Amino acid sequence: MSLEDKVGQLFVMHVYGHSATDPDPADVDTNLRELGVRDAAELIARYRLGGIIYFGWAHNTRSPHQIAELSEGIQKASPTVPVLISVDQEHGAVARIGAPATLLPGAMALGASGSHEHAREAARIAGAELRALGIRQDHAPDADVNVDPANPVIGVRSFGADPDAVAGFVAAQIEGYRSAGIASAAKHFPGHGDTTDDSHTELPHIHHTREEWDRYDAPPFRAAIAAGVDSVMTAHIVVPALDPSGDPATLSRPILTGILREELGYDGVIATDSLAMRGVRTKYGDDRVAVLALKAGADQLLNPPRPDVAWNAVIDAVGNGELTEERIEESVLRVLRMKARVGLLDHVLHEDGTPSTPPAPTPSVDAAVGTPAHLVAADHIADATTTLLVNTDALLPLSPAAHPRVLVVGADPRSPSGTTGPPTTVLAGALNSLGFQAVALPTGTAPDEATIEKAVAEAQGRDAVLVATYNITTHAATKDHTQAANTTLDRTPHPHARAHQATDPSDGSGQVGLVAALKATGLPVITLAIRNPYDVAHLPPVDAALASYCWTDVELRAAARVIAGRTAPQGRLPVPVRRADDPAQVLYPIGHGLTY
């Protein structure tokens, strides 16, 4: 391999379009403007790419057959060394590929199930479907321990707040992906669970001491390494206790080489999080970030915003001696070993040394993607996740005989893949299929007075009201940052506790006001937290409260079955819910969950 070939193997890029060689004209224009090429084939040829990552916003994921054809076209464009195609298909709140592929409960929902077997099976199903689409790496599972309810970037992407519990689920999912022939990626090292800043737009600081990091952040990554994880993704966060330089972990040699490689003994691929994120671009220019990441110990450079600048910067760094070619080769070998483990190098060359065409993705799309068996399994897993937090006077389960007419109101956040409509519409439809006469009225995440009045008017003549709430805790006017790692397990308050003023203009009062107004009608009011489960602490007392941990169809249908008594609630909180007015007090501890 030439130096250019080797450097190219370290880059993982997105590209716009549903086809490797014939994207829509608008996608050609975008590719030319952002990447300097027309399509995926030209991108691979120019940069000798080692990897491509799919996104819905890049128009890569229209349908299963289209995705498989795109993957095949990408491999044909790289006949010498196959491309490792990857995706962020965490399920739950982060899913790039939607129906008719199988959509499964996300991490925190799986954590609520308490079942490693469910987590393992979910990863196996997800992996089997990705492999049939020509995708050999999933940037999952999330190994962060979500200890701050106000965390804007992790939340339900985490399995929970107990480090040991998270570690068990991380290991189970890595085993599931491996059984399907898919490379997994534990993220975001050294741990992104205790921050109120989003590294997409800011550079977060984590104020754990080294001892706290060892106790709370490290266990899931240790478990991932022990389970044989193929890749560890970095976080664009500053952790002064691990590296006082102020550099984000992605660019920190003390963190990536000193801790991850030398202390934890990890010799697999280290991948950066997207280098287009603001968190990694605040201190250095785009011409330096890729070089510094490699110097720190990274192997894969994900999505630099200016690929020509980053690629040439690495070439130049080898030329001027800042990076050695031997250092590049170390990373190339790790990348090639990962490709070999997932079967990408099985058919690279004929015996005479000439390149061969990679085989089409197997098994076939129709035989593997969205199969009846997978869909049934997804519903079965989801049935174990819904958590019942409050059930005053045993209101639940509702029956169509006693409470036939149900008004479903509430949040209508932007739908992830796997959602067929606003949560209220999906919930109402699910209840109707169970014998109720349910009507949906989306009221948004910040209902105003007129919207609340309309909901109250619609409630007249109903027998019960179901309110879908969405992340009231992250919109609260003032949030106390005492929910750090050592208070999560009911220890003393974190020494770096601080107040954090919210910047989101939606302060949550609209959702609180909606629930209060509906409760004042005298009707039974049921709330369902459709993302983070902390909402109940910010609401007035209600007759029943549940958490579904996401608003994809599979989780909403499971919640409807619980509300109707078709299944008993089985989920248990994987995080503590603290009092809104006194966060030092736990309202509902880890493990809380009612049943009937």
Image (cartoon, rainbow, N blue to C red):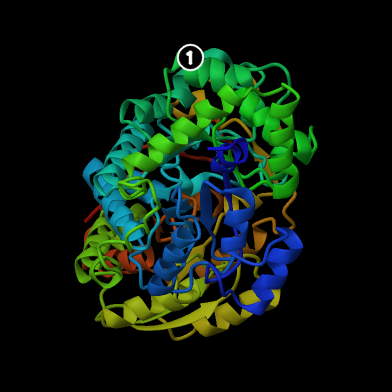
- 482 or 247: which is nearer to us? 247
In the rendered image of this protein, does residue 271 appear above or below residue 66? Answer: above
Q: Residue at x 21, y 71 (%)?
A: 372
x then y, percent, for residue 424: 47, 74
Q: Residue at x 61, y 16 (%)?
A: 254
Which quadrant would the C terminus be assigned to in this image? Answer: bottom left
In the rendered image of this protein, does residue 473 appear above or below residue 333? Answer: below
Q: Is residue 418 visible?
A: no
In the rendered image of this protein, does residue 67 appear above or below residue 234? Answer: below
- 181 or 436: which is nearer to us? 181
- 7 or 234: which is nearer to us? 7
Which residue was labeled with disc 1?
Answer: 262
Q: Give the left or right position of residue 403, taking residue 578 as reference.
A: left
**Label 1 SS:** helix
Disc 1 residue type (three-letter): Glu
Q: Give the left or right position of residue 256, taking residue 448 as reference.
A: left
Q: Residue at x 32, y 53 (%)?
A: 127
Other-residue count near label 1 (Cα within 10 Å), few / some / many at <14 / 14–19 / ≥20: few
